Amino acid sequence: METIGIGIIGCDDMGRHLAISAHAVEGLEVICVSDSQEALAEKLAADLNVSWTSDYHELLSDDRVHVVLIATSPSQQIVTDTVAAGKYDFHSIAPLDTKGIQQMLIEHLLPPAEFFDNFRNR
């Protein structure tokens, strides 16, 4: 299975929960986290052994990031910038427990096994 690179914008409680949940799902790889509060981004990045930035535009410019989980207060600019960068944006996530978040990420981000079988057999 191919790995899908994940970027997280917003590293407070919800972003941290999303990042840790995504980090535990096979097929997803957290590449970078971003928050304007550098201490939050740096701490989460250290906990997951990933890169961090205080400028989300740097995260968006990383070719390894395919999907951006937006865990900040609603910002149309962040969504617009994410789409303009050609990234899939995933936001407005209702509070769930870790298992619920992981299931949601699997259902929404990981293609079914048949996709990879069909892709390989072309």
Image (tube, rainbow, N blue to C red):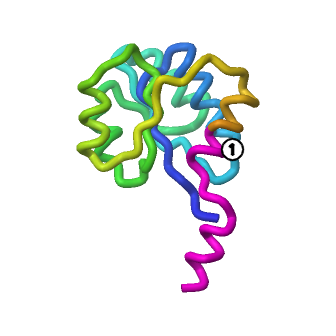
What secondary structure is the stretch in magenta mostly built from? helix
Residue 93 higher or lower than 118, as above or below = above
Position of 62 compared to 16: left or right?
Answer: left
Q: Which residues are magenta?
A: 105-122
Question: Residue sitting at 49 percent across and 43 percent down?
Answer: 6
Q: Quadrant of residue 59?
A: top left
Q: Quadrant of residue 118?
A: bottom right
Q: Quadrant of residue 48?
A: top right
Position of 76 compared to 91: left or right?
Answer: left
Residue designated by label 1: 25
Residue 51 higher or lower than 11, as above or below = below
- Camera-nearest residue between 40 and 74: 74
Question: Residue sitting at 64 percent across and 45 percent down?
Answer: 107
- Camera-nearest residue between 49 and 74: 74
| Image quarter in which the C terminus is found | bottom right
Q: Secondary structure at mark 1?
A: loop
The magenta stretch spans residue 108: yes
The magenta stretch spans residue 18: no
Q: Position of residue 2 (x, y in %)?
A: 58, 63
Question: Residue sitting at 64 percent across and 53 percent down?
Answer: 27
Q: Position of residue 110 (x, y in %)?
A: 61, 52
- Camera-nearest residue between 99 and 17: 99
Q: Crowdedness of circle 1 by 10 Å Cα count: few (<14), some, many (20+)?
A: some
Question: Residue sitting at 42 percent across and 32 percent down?
Answer: 52
Q: Position of residue 80 (x, y in %)?
A: 25, 34
| Image quarter in which the N terminus is found | bottom right
Residue 74 higher or lower than 113, as above or below = above
Amino acid on which the number 1 mark rests in the picture = Val
